[in-house]
Image: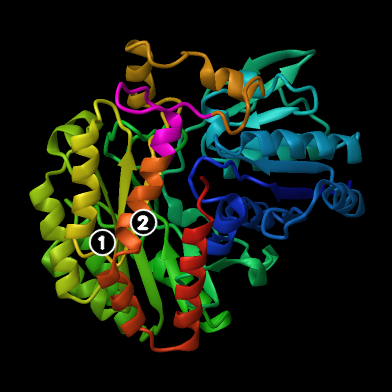
Amino acid sequence: MNKPHTLLVKYHQNANIRPIPDEAEETLQVYPALGIGYLASYLRKYDYPVDILDAHALKMESDEFGRTLKEKNPDIVGITSTTIGWPGAVEAAGLARKALPDALIVVGGPHLSVYPEESLSFPFIDIAVIGDGEETLLEIVRKKEKGELLEDIKGTAVKINGEVKINPPRPWIENLSDLPHPAVDLLPLDRYKCLTLEHPFFTMISSRGCPYKCGFCSQVYCGDRARFRSPEDLVDEIEKYVHDYSAREIVMFDETFTIDEKRVLEICKLIKERKLKFRWNIRTRVDTVTDRMLAALKETGCYGIHMGVESGDQRILKVMRKGITLDRVRWAFKTARKYGFITRGYFMIGYLDENPDTYKSTVDIARELDLDFASFSITTPLPATHLFEESVNRGYLDPDFWKKYTLLQVSKEDFPHIPSEYWDEKELANMMRKAYYSFYLRPAYVWKRITSIKSWKQFMDLFRGLKIMMMMKD
């Protein structure tokens, strides 16, 4: 009996919810499809044939995508999706069904954990994976191989005679170090880019989930606690990229890399013991970094630290359930600067109870912190978050918005924002532009960037960054 061949797909995920146009966003960054890389390696561990098609990175139009599916002729097509990128996943599934009438169409990703029944309302989607995907997808493939029914697989929603059945959840994978490293050899590595990174670069995660309860974030798709890889396993993966792929930079995409100081220090110790030379950066919270930790990270080549500030007003931070203070924000970035880190802060505009004064405080603190980079976003109440529930309770938003979005009954660009007596949606976008201009077009900041240029790449990065600033939507 031939083993079923699986093709894992990332299709176009863009949705224009920022003031930066999609084409400009893709100039900034296109990252490796890490999630389907993990799925592919897990299937290969059990000797099942698998390929990856990152149509997003390859900039495939629908016609080329359909032709490629026919050429590869897989038995199973697995499509990953975020909530924002759901319309693209639906399009990909429809194209897959047209190209491969007999294939099993599987869709997974964060969005499927929230609206599995609505997601399966499309006739060309057969089964949805909910939660960690590796073990569930393997069971789907095995049952497909044996010709068995797919009705009772834990961690799935499945269509049976036109009716959707939601099965019991599959337990979270507790020991993430049991998972093989992502199948990066199946990815189009030459297509990934980021304006501020050295190439070649790789992305990694050292954990899944987050124990914090910020009001604007949902961990429903990966659990409300953090699960960790061992320091040894993590550094093994780093070593592979550095030695086998000549990686110059690695991006840690954990929600909060520095939750456990002892673990971070052990990771740093192993990197030094193995004499690994590379640049890397992390994302974390201001209240989980320590002086000792930052010193150890810097010694291993970690040069960049990204931390969420979100608001410059303490009252809004409380509304956000962020659990941090502005004093701690200032301390964390000051200490990071002391060790020479390149810093980036994240900020949200238009949160619940925002007013012109709190908005100004956010723009002001972004400038005050002497950051190297700042990222501003218009607050979007995503499903399964306290922010969305509170917005609905206050009568601000349609409680069925994301269901309608899943069913493609609203425009992919018609995202909800928080209504305010102070501004409408158009003015909110204008506030976003002003925040970016206020931060990046300061003469002192521009001069700082110009005088720090040490290579042609840095000059071109600055030029492209300024060009993107000019491309922001009116």
Residue 418: say if magenta. Answer: yes
The residue positioned 62% from the left and 34% from the top of the image is 86
| Mark 1 closeness class: few <14, some 14–19, many ≥20 residues within 10 Å | some
Q: What's drawn in magenta, residue-wise?
A: 415-429
Identify which amino acid the numbered label 2 is placed on: Tyr
Q: Which mark is residue 55?
A: none
Q: Return the disc, 2 or 1, that comes first in the chain's sequence.
A: 1
Mark 2 lies on a secondary structure that is helix
Q: Residue furthest left?
A: 327
Q: Residues within 10 Å of mark 2 (few under 14, many from 20)?
A: few
Q: Nearer the viewer, mark 2 or mark 1?
A: 2
Residue 175: x and y in percent read 42, 49
Name which residue lies at 51% across and 29% down. 415
Give the percent coordinates (x, y) of residue 22. 59, 51
In the rendered image, residue 341, in percent from the top left (x then y), is placed at: 25, 72
Q: Position of residue 403 (x, y in %)?
A: 57, 18
Which residue: 86% across, 46% down?
66
In the rendered structure, the answer to whether residue 310 lies left or right of residue 109 reads left
- The answer, for residue 396, to whether it is visible in the render is yes
